[in-house]
Image: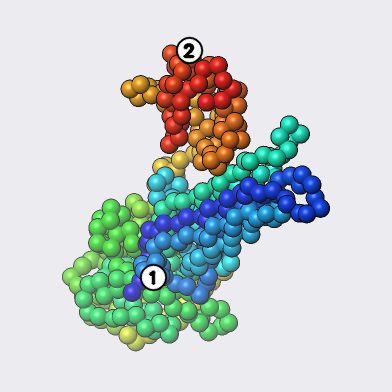
């Protein structure tokens, strides 16, 4: 089974907690603090592996969490950093943030990697807080939480040549003739429901990858039928071979078929309409094919006179070698890795600008008789500090005083014993004291 889209949850490892400890060696009087820092949490890294072709593995495992860093140790020893978690993905995978729709990375080259969830920093041990005024602090930090997010993965087939066309025009048969691929072939619509890849040996030392892409129908650009599941893969191909049933065996008109498919591609992404294209006029061994080909050529001249039309028969293999030579020649003339942008994505793309924030900014609201302080800096501090020591409470009080929070609380009517909440931390306001 081919899986080309998946949604997973990733989380970087939490940082290790810092340690409160003191040196107690026999011959080191007043040894002072000796608590080490916690280790950094592991990152979640996505790395391209050219040996993978599908996102099947992500159907069964949807959560990826890196390990947390080790806690700090005594004797000023740093806790060990956690190992990074490396997740292997196939080439051609686009990674998007599920919440913002932002493109995280477009993974195309073997070995290419990107950090999708960073691990948290380790907390500082009490040795980091020693000062001349407080040489033995009982103060340490918790490890920072690792980044977490939902990631949407979209796989776009990496192929040099893409076979497009209506269902049952002979795309799978053509691929099976020119390569060792064995796609499912049947005389009914949508035999091919997943892309098939095959390595094609031209015969003169050149080779390329060809993809048999699922058949299109009208409305595909809006998601009708296989819709976007098909069109997503067309973006990666460097040359399009448009297979047309020139015999009209299904009762359809070859020229109308060609126009409809091109229109669906253009509506999905106008840049794809400019991709080099060869029309493979297939089933030339069938009755009426020659007459239909003449009419097709005349009709195409009025729309696109430069279009190459090559008659072939996948059954008798007539014209197949000439088609391969021409496709290889076009590949030699164009860049190996063209940059294809989705116009719709560009229009919706968000531009993120760095706005300098006032780290001392805060707001105060009322919740019945309680005052609630909102401040990113203080809430971040409360998450990091180990608030079970006297020194930690003093540090919080100094921070609130320097930021002007206590003065603003008095101005709003806070008195002795008034309850104050910051995040999940609650305390009583004490008037005339250096701390709460």
Q: Residues within 10 Å of mark 1 (few under 14, many from 20)?
A: some
Q: Secondary structure at mark 1?
A: loop
Q: Nearer the viewer, residue 360 or 354?
A: 360
In the image, which disc is placed on residue 411? 2
User: Residue farthest to the front?
Assistant: 26
Q: Position of residue 65 (x, y in %)?
A: 47, 60
Q: Residues within 10 Å of mark 2 (few under 14, many from 20)?
A: few
Residue 360 seen in this snapshot: no
Residue 422 seen in this snapshot: yes
Disc 1 to disc 2, C-alpha distance: 61 Å
Q: Residue at x 76, y 54 (%)?
A: 25
Q: Position of residue 243 (x, y in %)?
A: 34, 71
Q: Nearer the viewer, mark 1 or mark 2?
A: 2
Residue of label 1:
56
Q: Is residue 269 above or below residue 286?
A: above
Q: Is residue 45 above or below residue 183?
A: above
Q: Is residue 205 left or right of residue 379?
A: right
Q: Is residue 38 left or right of residue 321?
A: right
Q: Nearer the viewer, residue 395 or 137?
A: 137
Q: Position of residue 415 (x, y in %)?
A: 45, 16
Q: Secondary structure at mark 2?
A: helix
Q: Nearer the viewer, residue 144 or 359?
A: 144
Q: Position of residue 70 (x, y in %)?
A: 59, 58
Question: Which image quadrant is residue 196 in?
Answer: bottom left
Q: Residue at x 47, y 55 (%)?
A: 11
* Quadrant of the drawing holding the N terminus: bottom left
User: Residue farthest to the left?
Assistant: 251
| Disc nearer the start of the sequence (1/2) | 1
């Amino acid at each position: 089974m081919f899986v080309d889209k998946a949604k997973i949850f990733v989380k970087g490892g939490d940082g290790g907690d810092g340690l409160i400890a003191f040196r107690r060696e026999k011959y080191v009087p007043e040894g002072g603090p000796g608590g080490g820092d916690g280790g950094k949490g592991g990152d979640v890294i996505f790395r391209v592996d050219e040996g993978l072709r599908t996102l099947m593995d992500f159907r069964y495992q949807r959560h990826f969490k890196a390990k947390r860093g080790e806690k700090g140790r005594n004797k000023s020893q740093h806790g060990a950093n956690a190992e990074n978690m490396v997740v292997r993905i196939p080439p051609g995978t686009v990674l998007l943030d599920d919440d913002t729709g932002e493109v995280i990375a477009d993974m195309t080259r073997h070995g290419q990697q990107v950090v999708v969830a960073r691990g948290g920093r380790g907390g500082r041990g009490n040795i980091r807080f020693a000062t001349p005024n407080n040489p033995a602090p009982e103060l340490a930090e918790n490890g920072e939480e690792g980044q977490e997010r939902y990631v949407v993965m979209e796989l776009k087939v990496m192929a040099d040549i893409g076979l497009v066309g209506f269902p049952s025009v002979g795309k799978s048969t053509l691929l099976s003739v020119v390569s060792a691929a064995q796609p499912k072939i049947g005389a009914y619509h949508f035999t091919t429901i997943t892309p098939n890849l095959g390595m094609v040996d031209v015969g003169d030392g050149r080779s390329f990858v060809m993809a048999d892409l699922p058949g299109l129908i009208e409305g595909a650009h809006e998601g009708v039928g296989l819709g976007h599941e098909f069109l997503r893969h067309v973006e990666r191909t460097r040359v399009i071979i448009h297979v047309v049933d020139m015999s009209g065996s299904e009762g359809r008109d070859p020229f109308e078929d060609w126009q409809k498919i091109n229109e669906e591609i253009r509506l999905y992404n106008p840049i794809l309409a400019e991709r080099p294209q060869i029309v493979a006029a297939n089933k030339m061994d069938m009755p009426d094919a020659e007459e239909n080909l003449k009419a097709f050529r005349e009709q195409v001249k009025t729309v696109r006179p430069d279009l190459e039309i090559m008659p072939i028969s996948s059954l008798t293999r007539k014209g197949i070698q000439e088609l391969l030579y021409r496709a290889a020649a076009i590949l030699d003339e164009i860049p190996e890795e063209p940059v294809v942008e989705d116009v719709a994505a560009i229009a919706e793309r968000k531009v993120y600008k760095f706005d300098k924030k006032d780290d001392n900014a805060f707001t105060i609201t009322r919740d019945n008789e309680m005052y609630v302080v909102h401040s990113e800096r203080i809430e971040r501090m409360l998450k990091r500090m180990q608030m079970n020591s006297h020194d930690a409470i003093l540090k919080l009080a100094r921070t609130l005083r320097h930021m002007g929070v206590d003065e603003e609380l008095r101005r709003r009517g806070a008195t002795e014993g008034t309850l104050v909440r910051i995040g999940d931390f609650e305390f009583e306001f004490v008037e005339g004291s250096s701390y709460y």
